[in-house]
Amino acid sequence: MANFSERLSELIQSSGAQKKEIAEYLDVTYRQFRRYETGDGKPDFDGLIKLADFFDVSLDYLVGRSDNPERR
């Protein structure tokens, strides 16, 4: 299974969303968001929920605990 930063990169690429758009949605700087993608930082719990909502995936999928993106 993928780790968080790998999964985030995959979701960004497959969604076609702009990284700046996602950073604004999370209310973090672009630089901080890039740290999430490179694995040098991680969002807080609220940020994880927002990312799961943004990409319409489960938290388990987002953090690499599951390969099933569907929410239950």
Image (tube, rainbow, N blue to C red):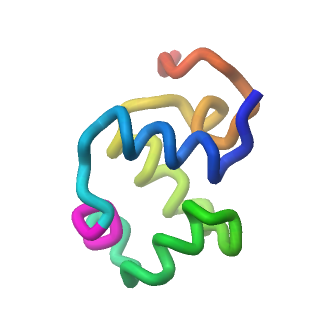
Percent coordinates x, y for residue 24 in the rendering = 27, 72
Q: In which quarter of the image is residue 60?
A: top right
Q: Which of 62 and 35 is in front in this view?
A: 35
What residue is rendered at 49% in x and 50% in y?
Answer: 49
Q: Nearer the viewer, residue 46 or 4?
A: 4
- Image check: 46 left or right of 21? right
- Image check: 15 left or right of 71? left
Q: Nearer the viewer, residue 49 or 12?
A: 12
Percent coordinates x, y for residue 57 in the rendering = 46, 30
Q: Nearer the viewer, residue 15 or 57?
A: 15
Q: Magenta part mainly helix, strand or loop?
A: helix
Report the quarter where the N terminus lies: top right
Task: Report the span colored magenta.
Answer: 20-24
23 in magenta: yes
68 up-or-down from 17: above or below: above
39 in magenta: no
- Image check: 32 left or right of 68? left
65 up-or-down from 25: above or below: above
What residue is rendered at 49% in x and 71% in y?
Answer: 34
Percent coordinates x, y for residue 45 in the rendering = 61, 61
- For the image, the number of numbered tags is 0
30 up-or-down from 15: above or below: below
1 up-or-down from 32: above or below: above
